[in-house]
């Protein structure tokens, strides 16, 4: 799965518009907007980190690099979802925005799981290769590493 800012901006744009919808007063609208802006900046930084990993791999994600970055993104999105759920009424967050963000978060969790599973498999295969080389198993062809998009 390739992350692109446009994919995630759809749910973030709803969050930006959400602050404008807050009609319960200027103070809470400003507070909500500031909080969302901070969370959104952290989220976008993690998405950019994943995009940079993809660019470095010429369109293919390196699971060893993608796993920790994806885990951080999952953590930020979980924090954002928690904030939205807790402050839904206070910030006048529409149900469809929360639901859309839950769906985006589920996709991120799936990607993180796939990246971390692939990274663990690569590590295991590399350890097996080292063990074979150390035990005099010969210099056979190295094991084929998992390929393809995560």
Image (tube, rainbow, N blue to C red):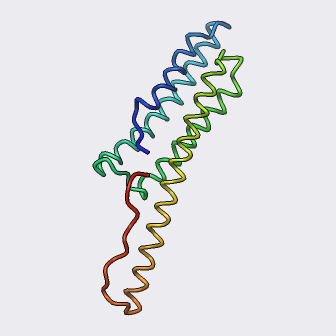
Q: In the image, is 129 to the left or to the right of 110? A: left
Quarter the N terminus occupies = top left
Q: Which of 41 and 142 is in front in this view?
A: 142
Q: Nearer the viewer, residue 100 or 55?
A: 100
Q: In the image, is 27 to the left or to the right of 104? A: right
Q: In the image, is 112 to the left or to the right of 84? A: left
Marks counted in the figure total 0
Q: Nearer the viewer, residue 132 or 79?
A: 132
* Image location (x, y in percent) of residue 3: 42, 40
* Image location (x, y in percent) of residue 99: 63, 28
Residue sitting at 39 percent across and 36 percent down?
4
When the figure is inspected, residue 94 is found, relative to residue 74, above or below; the finding is: above
* Image location (x, y in percent) of residue 83: 65, 29
Residue sitting at 40 percent across and 29 percent down?
6
- Quarter of the image where one finds residue 122: bottom left
* Image location (x, y in percent) of residue 94: 64, 18
Residue sitting at 37 percent across and 42 percent down?
51
- Quarter of the image where one finds residue 89: top right
Residue sitting at 52 percent across and 28 percent down?
38
When the figure is inspected, residue 33 is found, relative to residue 1, above or below; the finding is: above
- Quarter of the image where one finds residue 130: bottom left
């Amino acid at each position: 799965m390739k992350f692109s800012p446009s994919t995630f901006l759809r749910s973030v744009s709803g969050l930006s518009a959400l602050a404008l919808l807050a009609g319960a007063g200027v103070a809470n609208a400003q507070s909500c907007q500031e909080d969302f802006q901070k969370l959104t900046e952290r989220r976008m930084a993690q998405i950019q980190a994943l995009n940079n990993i993809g660019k470095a791999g010429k369109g293919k994600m390196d699971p060893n690099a993608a796993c920790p970055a994806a885990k951080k993104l999952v953590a930020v999105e979980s924090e954002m979802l928690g904030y939205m759920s807790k402050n839904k009424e206070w910030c006048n967050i529409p149900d469809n925005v929360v639901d859309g963000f839950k769906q985006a978060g589920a996709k991120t969790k799936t990607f993180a799981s796939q990246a971390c599973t692939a990274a663990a498999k690569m590590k295991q295969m590399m350890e097996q290769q080292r063990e074979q080389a150390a035990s005099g198993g010969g210099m056979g062809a190295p094991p084929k590493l998992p390929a393809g998009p995560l």
